[in-house]
Amino acid sequence: MIVPAVDDLAEHTSIKKACGLLVRSPGGHYCAKQPRMHGPAPRRPTPPNALTDEEQAQVLAALTSERFVDKSVAQTWAILLDEGAYLCSVSTMHRILRCDGATGERHRQATHPARKKPKLLATGPGQIWSWDITKLRGLGRECWFQPYVVLDILSRYVVA
């Protein structure tokens, strides 16, 4: 209801002055005049200088080749540039690797064998003991008791 009033008043003055007289922000006026968009946002058009699929495959092949597999993207780009081959920018190389799911560490990572939990087998009493310690507050301000207990695993009796 206020949008037509601003438009009528803007015929005699500017939109800024009309919005000021009717206590309306000019940004809110322009936003109210635009039609509402429903559904997903339209796709951004492909820029004219975008790499073709063949060029992207060539960049990906260079980045994953045996020669550059242990090098960072910036190192690969610099080495290729020193040789006179400019494939694309560093950020485009990162974008191509991200689309291919090849981001992350590019050099070989050390693999460690999985740690095995020790398994203890007691065939008789007194062979394997386990211990525990607990802190208990005493009667004084900084008085603590620390009782220890040592258990025999097989018989479950307190040893010490």
Image (cartoon, rainbow, N blue to C red):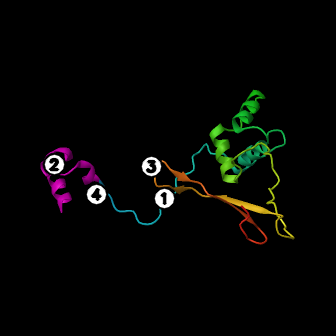
Q: Residue at x 16, y 48 (%)?
A: 18
The residue that mark 2 highlights is 18
Characterize the local packing of mark 2: few (<14), some (14-19) or many (20 or more) Cα atoms within 10 angstroms: many
Q: Which amino acid type is shown beneath numbered disc 2?
A: Ala
Q: Secondary structure at mark 1?
A: loop
Q: Secondary structure at mark 2?
A: helix
Q: Which amino acid type is shown beneath numbered disc 1?
A: Pro
Q: Quadrant of residue 59?
A: top right
The residue that mark 4 highlights is 33
Nearer to us in this view, 27 or 68: 68
* Residue at mark 2 to residue at mark 1: CA–CA distance: 33 Å
Q: Which amino acid type is shown beneath numbered disc 4?
A: Lys
- 8 in the magenta segment: yes
- Asked if disc 4 and disc 3 are in contact, CB closer than 8 Å, the reply is no
Q: Image height check: is 74 above or below 15?
A: above
* Residue at mark 2 to residue at mark 3: CA–CA distance: 76 Å
Nearest to N terminus: mark 4 or mark 1:
4
The residue that mark 1 highlights is 42
Q: Nearer the viewer, mark 1 or mark 3?
A: 3
Characterize the local packing of mark 4: few (<14), some (14-19) or many (20 or more) Cα atoms within 10 angstroms: few
Residue lying furthest right in this view?
123
Q: Residue at x 67, y 48 (%)?
A: 96
Residue lying furthest bottom in this view?
155
Give how far across and how far down residue 23 sits, in percent: 15, 51
